[in-house]
């Protein structure tokens, strides 16, 4: 008992009161089974900020959800790129890394969310994205920073990469002359995302500030000049 009293007086506060961290996440589905995933909050903020770029002929990966949501009447034609030959929403079956199936200088906007981390050579994919854009066309891309790696995915689309803002900027600058990169997140949302919590599990003020040392979501706006 005497030792315990002495320890409480002498030990630093960090040693006296340890936060409880559970050994298992709340969800292994990025919080999708609880509400809107933390990274989707940032993805959709980014796209909302650049909604005016979603115009003309727009290309999106897998399905046109964000084209329809953020483009509205500015979109003349919506295309969907997918590598799977039986993809139900695809208008273009192709390979972003090699450029197979992608037309040249065709798109005014390319929405490419959470895809470069699944490509073996993301630098090559950025080269092909640049080629597919018309002059003045805009690439709106997002990539994961701090995130867990899901077990599912299979051999066709393995989860390969995590990024930093500086690393994504360097990759993009090899293909694009006009590059803007921004990171979103802070220690609270990073921890929540790793534990599989959703937006609804957090107070609203958790999303009001970003800390450059805790990059949850990294967003790229690049223009083909």
Image (cartoon, helix red, strand yellow):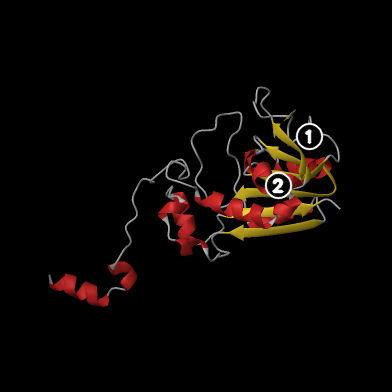
In the image: residue 56, left or right of residue 192: right
SS label for mark 2: helix
**2 vs 1, front mark:** 2
Q: Say if 96 sits above or below 178 in the image.
A: above
Quarter of the rendering occupied by the N terminus: bottom left
Dividing the picture into quadrants, the one containing residue 80 is: top right
Q: Are marks 2 and 1 in contact (CB under 8 Å)?
A: no
Q: Residue furthest front?
A: 73
**Where residue 71 is drawn, which disc sits there?**
2
Q: Write the residue at 17% across / 74% down.
A: 5
In the rendered image, which quarter is residue 6 located in? bottom left
Of all residues shown, which one is farthest toward the left?
1
Residue in view at x 43 percent, y 60 percent: 203
Q: Position of residue 27 (x, y in %)?
A: 41, 43
Q: Quick one: 144 or 200, which is closer to the camera?
A: 200
Residue 116 visible to the viewer: no
Residue at the bottom extreme of this rendering: 9
Q: How many marks?
A: 2
Q: On screen, 73 above or below 13?
A: above
129 lies left or right of 118: right
Q: Position of residue 168 (x, y in %)?
A: 68, 53
- Nearest the viewer among 43 and 124 is 43
What whole-number distance in Å separates the C-alpha atoms at marks 2 and 1? 25 Å
Q: Which mark is residue 99?
A: 1
| Secondary structure category for the residue under label 1 | loop
Snapshot quadrant of residue 96: top right
Q: Residues within 10 Å of mark 2 (few under 14, many from 20)?
A: many
Q: Residues within 10 Å of mark 1 (few under 14, many from 20)?
A: some
Q: Residue 214: percent from the left, percent from the top?
A: 54, 60
Mark found first going from the N terminus, 2 or 1: 2
Residue 146: give x, y in percent of width and height.
53, 52
- Residue 24 visible somewhere in the drawing: yes
């Amino acid at each position: 008992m005497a030792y315990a009293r002495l320890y409480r007086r002498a030990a630093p506060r960090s040693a006296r009161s340890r936060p409880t961290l559970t050994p298992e996440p709340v969800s292994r589905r990025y919080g999708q089974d609880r509400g809107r995933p933390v990274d989707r909050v940032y993805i959709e903020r980014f796209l909302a900020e650049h909604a005016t770029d979603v115009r003309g002929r727009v290309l999106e990966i897998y399905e046109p959800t964000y084209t329809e949501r953020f483009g509205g009447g500015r979109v003349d034609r919506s295309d969907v790129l997918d590598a799977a030959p039986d993809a139900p929403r695809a208008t273009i079956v192709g390979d972003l890394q090699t450029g197979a199936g992608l037309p040249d200088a065709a798109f005014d906007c390319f929405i490419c969310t959470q895809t470069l981390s699944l490509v073996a050579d993301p630098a090559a994919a950025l080269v092909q994205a640049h080629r597919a854009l018309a002059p003045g066309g805009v690439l709106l891309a997002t990539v994961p920073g701090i995130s867990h790696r899901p077990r599912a995915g299979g051999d066709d689309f393995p989860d390969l990469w995590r990024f930093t803002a500086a690393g994504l900027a360097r990759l993009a600058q090899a293909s694009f002359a006009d590059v803007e990169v921004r990171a979103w997140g802070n220690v609270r949302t990073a921890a929540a995302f790793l534990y599989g919590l959703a937006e609804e599990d957090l107070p609203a003020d958790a999303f009001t500030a970003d800390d450059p040392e805790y990059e949850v979501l990294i967003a790229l706006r690049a223009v083909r000049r």
